Image: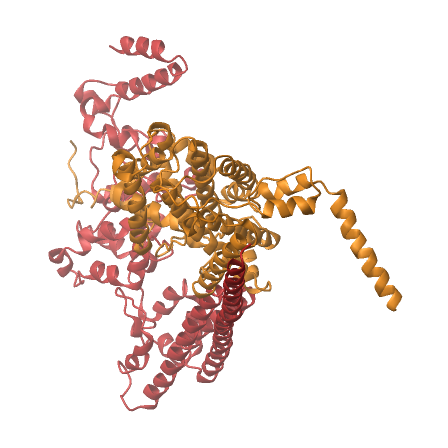
Amino acid sequence: MRALVLVAALALALPGTGRAQATQSADSATTRYGCLACHADKRAAFEEGVHSERGIQCHDCHGGNPASRSLPAAHGGKFTGSPGKVAVVALCGSCHSDPNQMRQYGLPTGIVAEFRTSRHGMLLLQQQNADAPTCTSCHDAHTILRPDDARSTVYPTNITSTCAPCHENKALMDKYGLPTDQVRQFEQSAHGLALKDQNFAAPTCLGCHGSHSALPPKVTEITSVCSRCHVGVGNAFQRGPHGQAARSGKLAGCLACHGNHDTERVPEAQIAATCHKCHEPDSEAVALGGRIQADVVQASGDLQAAAKAIEDVTRAGLQTADLQFRLETARTAYLQITEVQHDLDLERLDDLTRSVRSISRDLRGAAEASAEHKWEHKLWLVPVWFLALAWVSMSVLVIRSYERKGP
Amino acid sequence: MRRLWQGAVQWLSQLGADIRDSTDAGLLGVARFFGLLYGPIDTSLPIDQALNKAWRYRLPAHTSWRHALGGITHLLFLVLVVTGVMLAVYYRPSAQEAFPSIQHIVSGVTLGWLVRDLHVWSASLLVLAALAHMAQVFFEAGYKPPRETTWLVGVVLLFVVLAFGATGYLLAWDQSAYWTVTEALAALERMPLLGGFLAGLLRADPIVSGATLSRFFAAHVIVLPWLSLAALGFHFAMVRRHGVAPPLTPVDPARERRQFFPNHLLRASMLGVLVLALAITLAILSPRPVGVAAHPGELPDVLISSWIVVDVSRALAFYLGSWGFALFTLLGLALALLPLFDRGPARDLKQRPVAAAIGLTFFLSFLALWIVGRTLRTIPPDASVANPPAAEASVPAVPAATDTSAQGEPR
């Protein structure tokens, strides 16, 4: 049969022959590999992924003798069968903790050490608790795909569904007093929505909890975790009175206002209302919150009006490079407002709001001027129609007199 | 001082005589070629007498306002030539500069806005005038022998006009123009047989780009003007050779034939001035929006058309699909080739049902499609490209259930 195929390939397309032979030899290599004689269902897993590409085969992890075709001999030697959860960690670690083997791939070798510090690792390795996951619980046992392969279980958009099978299992989580609604909350959060829009700068579960060293951040660590991405806001927060409270553990850092898994932007109009969570309704702090809210609402409205004004000027046919430059200045000021509102420095906030307002007023002025310019155009209709009608009536008169007189 | 004045007057009058005496009357043929003079030119006379003689030419007795449609079309064409040259002075045909240069024309150049909108509106009015002219000739059976060539060249001119509009449309290089052309080329690409080849030839790139703009600009300001000049000259020559079609009902032979100058010329000028005023009014009251610069990576919310042919094409593509588009084109082609198969002496509409059916269907559906197309707001069909199916669609939903037994058994 194979010979027939070969002849057919030769007859059909000579340049294709080399390819046909290569496929054929690869076929026979996997066919000759002993394990697959019985474990044919693992063939697909065996042929795909980075391990397969590097020539790592069944017996490298499971032991046994692939050269042998008879059962007792094939499962002889250092055959381990399907290793248990604890054994898996040691098995993976035997290569992945070895700098000499990982150096060529640039992979970190501290994974097992990290895993040991995680809640998962503590349960599994110290308490031999089979509820805890091992390496192959999150990474497929046989088909190890690169993390940037969209089919990988650790591809950003697949992370939640990798964590969910355990963390949404109510019976399992009740044993450890953990909630099961994190994924649902995350999907509706600012982070979850950004991730859904393919924005891979957004954190998944791992972004805040770590991957191999997964643990919930401590109360005093929260601000640092968020600041890894939200640098400016984090610095401002640390400068202000709330930062001090967070460092001493009295305030749950950023989460106090923004929530954890359901992280949300506090809408501009809700800033003061958020202060009520901790402060008395008629306290000075709530009053300050009201003034911050007023500034932010004002600046955001001004910024939108400025962008709209530029659009109007563009539609009026004017070039807007200078105006765009000013808008960029206003945007920068607004960006600073979003930071400064976290250190409660009202004076600076007022300054920035004023500068956004002043730029916005200028741009709106430019838009109005360009609209007025258009109105003048209509005045041209008067001379145009005056001349046209004058010409027509003159012509009528001339033609009449001419035709009365005869040519 | 007085002597200087007298000397200047004498010299000027002599200069006039010099020019008159040394200029060949054949030069009037140029004016005739451009359709500015109608009667025969006696080249044996000095140029001023030849002009006088040509002016005394008397038009056929049945000439009436309905014959002015061709002249109006020609006037609008001349308006387009003049405004087009003015625009070309400031327009810069490159993807980076096209839109800013139009902003400059509209806001920086004195009366640039008027010239641009006059160019835009004359283009739409030209199509209307040309089709009205065509309909008038069709209903009076003006395409029958011996005037087939006049009709066929007229059809060529119509296609030249359509090509002018189609190529000029992209030059605005704003979102609307960019995506309308993208949509139009995609429609052309889907047309059977030659569609893909033609679209590739016009687009010159996988997407509409600076290369496309260059091709469209070259066609708009170099190729098509020369083509239209040749076709127009031929069209006028044919009109002079065979005259306008005789009336359907004979007119009184004793009726006075109007003289070209000044009667006819004054009447024509009245109409011309009114058409110009109308075009300027439309340009002032309904300017084409400058919009926002073309952005190949960003789809507009809606597409707004500003040219009659785009309205019709979009209505066709949207409601009848690519085959509808092809069929309508075939209908237009059948109308164009009418003089090749409808050659009988019958001139009344009832006596030539096939021709009447084709003509009426074409003209009426063109008007209907225009009205429908003007209200049409679509997003380009390529819009689906902006949101490809998410990558995770191909990922198995949940990884296989985790093995919870701490110690597996060897298999």
Q: Which chain is orange?
A: B
In the image, what residue occupies the spot 15% across and 36% down?
A: B409
Disc tally is: 0
Q: Position of residue A340 (x, y in %)?
A: 44, 76
Q: Quadrant of residue A183?
A: bottom left
**Is B118 above or below relative to A370?**
above
Say above or below: A361 vs A153.
below
Horizontal and vertical percent for residue A79? 23, 29
Can see residue B296?
Answer: no
User: Is A370 positioned to the left or the right of B21 in the image?
Assistant: left
Regarding residue B21, the answer to whether it shows in the image is: yes
Chain A rendering hue: red
- The residue sitting at 39% across, 78% down in the picture is A296
Instruction: Check the image and name the residue furthest to the left.
Output: A171
- Is residue A363 or residue B198 the one in the foreground? B198
Using the image as rendered, state which of residue A223 and residue B151 is in the foreground.
B151
Nearer the observer, A346 or B288 = B288
